[in-house]
Image (cartoon, rainbow, N blue to C red):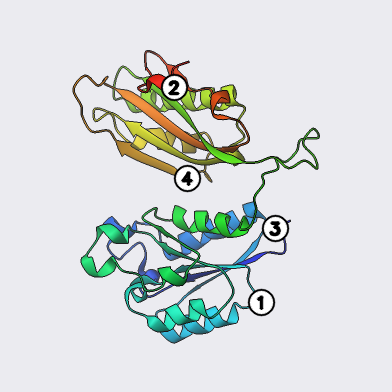
Amino acid sequence: MNKNKKLLVLHGPNLNLLGKREPQIYGKLTLEELNNLIYREAERLGVSVDCHQSNHEGSLIDLIHGAESKYDGIVFNPGAFTHYSIALRDAVAGVTVPTIEVHLSNISSREDFRHRSVIAPVAWGQISGLGPQGYLLAMRALVDRGKEVFSPEGSEETAGKQLISKTRAVRGAIDVSSNGENEILEATEELLQEMVTRNSINKSDIAAVIFSVTSDLNAVFPAKAARRMGWRDVPLFDVVEIDVPGALPRCIRVLMLINTNKGIHEIKHVYLKGAAVLRKDLRQ
């Protein structure tokens, strides 16, 4: 269904310096590496994509004008033009191609002058602060634009049927005895596999996974475990929990967002090795 769809990805000024320019803000990924992620995502989605980067306002305007009747969507990181380029704003507003504005960093948490986007009001949507994953999420949104149903693939029982899809949260937690890398990796893999097995989840149905660890654990290891399991196309996020009195030590918590037609009460949450659910309404 998506094979004829075409997306245009536009990188604005200074994005050619990715990997070198303020890596603590924009990350260590180079523009070439970012584009390779985008090309792989397009292949997975079954669409074609063209990527362009320019430091010149007029060049970006020409590319947006040329997208009319040629592309089904635009993923646009306007860079510094975000905050003052009325010309780019008018270009986006002047075409019928839906545009999603994307930013690697969270512009709302930075300097005051970065808080305002003149382009966002005429864009279909905006994704900010999710790093390279923002581009991939924007691509998925553009490909699925207008869809109101979800039809699982590869099932003879559901062939030709349309099932209402909703994003559901599967919660899980597991305790570990130490902050050792191998123990955390193995525990995280065990927890993720159990969550997937109990809920019959296909990897392609996972929208995102959020790992939350207590402050006595290394927050990098859980996501590393997911990558080791081959979850390379799944958006992963790591956070460290704030210390609160009475909180259990050395605990890994997972919030897995999935696209499914299951009801809330059909979701099976998973708690292993002494970990307990915090919300009473979720206890099974």
Q: Residues within 10 Å of mark 1 (few under 14, many from 20)?
A: few
- The amino acid beneath tag 3 is Asn
As drawn, the residue found furthest toward the left would be 245
Residue 86 spot, x, y in % from top left: 39, 82
Query: Residue 118's x, y, as percent?
Result: 37, 74
The answer to whether the residues at label 1 and label 2 have Cβ atoms under 8 Å apart is: no
Up the image or down, 168 lies above or below 144; here it is above
* Circle nearer the viewer, 3 or 1: 1
Q: Dot 3 corresponds to which residue?
A: 2
Q: Mark 4: which amino acid?
A: Pro
Outermost residue, top side:
274
Task: Using the image as rendered, state which of residue 165 and residue 213 is in the foreground.
Answer: 165
Q: Which residue is mark 2?
A: 282
* Disc 4 target residue: 235
Dot 3 falls on a residue whose secondary structure is loop
Above or below: residue 251 compared with residue 206 = above
Label disc, if present, on residue 69 of the rendered structure: 1
